[in-house]
Image (cartoon, helix red, strand yellow):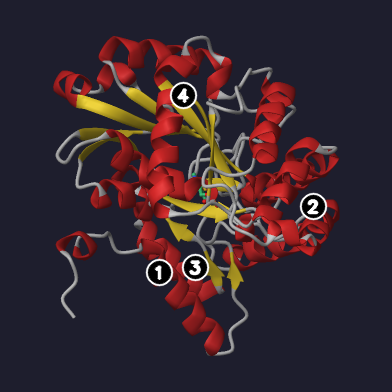
């Protein structure tokens, strides 16, 4: 069977090789601590599961959903944005229900760009952004996220010809993989930049709920003018441990929302209505479960960072997301270090290179296991004597 050129061009899943290596080690009977993945480890809160059970009992949910999702969920998304961010969203025109943020991220270039048009992506960045680039056959350039700039883009450093040509830019804070967060002034700068250069912004707010040290992540839409030039994508995957449920939504500029709805009219028939009803309950019920989850991740972050520093590993604490972005010791690349840890310590981490060229020099560690497991992982790494005498270079 001959596949289309489009499919042939799809990027290789960098992390497929990590999954294979971990599976092989586990099959050999090794007790691997897997810190390489981004899959929430906690269950969906009980009240949300119960809402699904009750909705699934109702035959009314067994029929096709309206193409663009049920009103109840769109209204819940608008209520959530009002409650959390004091942002006014019109549920009729400013919300698009999606199969997780991923489907929106991949669809957006198909909606807004013609073949060969330019989009700008962060490096390091979430690898699935590339899927949309390839499926829509558009051009892309990356902008670096550097430690000295708190992993925020330096808009002034983007080459003039790229600023003029680009039609779409992706941003993501709290950030995967760096764990960095953005403040309101950054988004104000973003809106000004986007307006000056006529670039549409997609802010990926997948980790929107997860900010540490009492600082709640800022929504891009909180900034005046954001809705004129962009959308934000939200997902229930992380906030409510609902990664398997596949519920997300885009909010913001009505023309972009209409474009997403339009393409989805032709691709899907929205989500199982009972899932949508349960998602609406998640967004509008008491948010105590979210506070507890964030406290859990913060505790794990503190445990990991303290343990790393105790063994002489000079690491920075993430301010959001559920990832830590740790510098690789001298003499290793991100890949050779990840391989070394798996081989010698039975600890799996994600090599920074998998997120882009500027991910080199780092590994990503997920805060998705309990504290004692994080400590055990660091103890195993300690036994390799990597940090005692050498100074760490990034
Ligand atoms: C930065 C980022 N954006 C989007 C997603 C996709 O989330 P969803 O489960 O809603 O498709 C992820 C998932 O890991 C992510 O890390």
Bin the neighbour count of mark 3 within 10 Å (Cα to Cα): few under 14, some 14-19, many 20 and up.
some
Q: Check the image and name the residue furthest to the bottom.
A: 28
Q: Which residue is mark 2?
A: 48
Compare marks 2 and 1 and give the one earlier in the sequence: 1
Give the foreground label among 2 and 1.
2
As drawn, is 317 to the left or to the right of 185?
A: right
Spatial CA span between label 1 and label 4: 37 Å
Compare marks 4 and 2 and give the one earlier in the sequence: 2
Q: Which residue is mark 1?
A: 16
Q: Which residue is mark 3?
A: 341
**Is label 4 in contact with label 2 (beta carbons under 8 Å)?**
no
Quadrant (top left/top right/bottom left/bottom right) for the N terminus: bottom left
**Residue 52 in picture, x, y percent from top left:** 77, 57
Give the foreground label among 2 and 3.
2
Spatial CA span between label 4 and label 2: 29 Å
**Residue 163 in picture, x, y percent from top left:** 22, 21
Bin the neighbour count of mark 1 within 10 Å (Cα to Cα): few under 14, some 14-19, many 20 and up.
few
Residue at 54% in and 63% down: 385
Spatial CA span between label 4 and label 3: 48 Å
Spatial CA span between label 2 and label 1: 31 Å
Between 224 and 263, the one lying in front of the other is: 263
Residue at 26% in and 60% down: 10
Between 1 and 120, the one lying in front of the other is: 1
Give the foreground label among 4 and 3.
4
Bin the neighbour count of mark 2 within 10 Å (Cα to Cα): few under 14, some 14-19, many 20 and up.
many
**Residue 238 in picture, x, y percent from top left:** 64, 48
Q: Secondary structure at mark 4?
A: helix
| Residue 146 visible, this angle | no
Q: Which residue is mark 4?
A: 254
**Residue 111 in picture, x, y percent from top left:** 32, 38
Q: In the figure, 244 relative to 126: above or below?
A: below
| Residue 278 visible, this angle | yes
């Amino acid at each position: 069977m001959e596949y289309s050129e489009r499919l042939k061009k799809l990027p290789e899943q960098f992390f497929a090789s990590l999954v294979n290596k971990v599976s092989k080690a586990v099959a050999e009977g090794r007790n691997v601590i897997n810190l390489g993945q981004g899959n929430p480890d906690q269950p969906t809160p009980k009240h949300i599961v119960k809402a699904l059970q009750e909705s699934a009992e109702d035959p009314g949910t067994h029929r096709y959903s309206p193409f663009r999702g049920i009103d109840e969920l769109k209204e819940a998304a608008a209520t959530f944005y009002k409650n959390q961010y004091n942002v006014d969203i019109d549920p009729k025109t400013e919300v698009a229900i999606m199969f997780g943020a991923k489907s929106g991220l991949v669809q957006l270039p198909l909606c807004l760009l013609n073949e060969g048009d330019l989009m700008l992506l962060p490096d390091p960045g979430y690898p699935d952004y590339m899927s949309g680039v390839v499926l829509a056959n558009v051009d892309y350039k990356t902008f670096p996220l550097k430690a000295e700039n708190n992993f925020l883009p330096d808009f002034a450093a983007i080459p003039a010809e790229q600023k003029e040509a680009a039609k779409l830019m992706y941003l993501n804070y709290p950030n995967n993989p760096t764990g960095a967060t953005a403040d309101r002034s950054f988004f104000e700068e973003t809106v000004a930049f986007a307006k000056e250069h006529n670039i549409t912004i997609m802010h990926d707010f997948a980790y929107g709920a997860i900010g540490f040290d009492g600082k709640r992540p800022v929504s891009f839409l909180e900034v005046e003018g954001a809705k004129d030039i962009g959308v934000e994508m939200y997902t229930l995957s992380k906030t409510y441990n609902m990664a398997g449920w596949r519920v997300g939504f885009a909010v913001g500029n009505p023309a972009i929302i209409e474009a997403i709805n339009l393409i989805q009219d032709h691709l899907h028939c929205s989500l199982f209505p009972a899932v949508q009803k349960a998602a609406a309950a998640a967004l509008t019920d008491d948010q105590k479960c979210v506070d507890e989850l964030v406290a859990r991740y913060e505790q794990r972050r503190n445990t990991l960072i303290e343990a790393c520093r105790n063994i002489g590993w000079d690491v920075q604490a993430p301010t959001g997301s559920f990832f830590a972005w740790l510098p690789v010791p001298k003499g290793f690349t991100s890949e050779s270090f990840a391989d070394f840890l798996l081989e010698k310590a039975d600890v799996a981490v994600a090599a920074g290179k998998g997120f882009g060229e500027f991910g080199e020099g780092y590994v990503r560690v997920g805060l998705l296991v309990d504290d004692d497991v994080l400590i055990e992982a660091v103890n195993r790494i300690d036994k390799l004597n990597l940090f005692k005498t050498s100074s760490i270079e990034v």
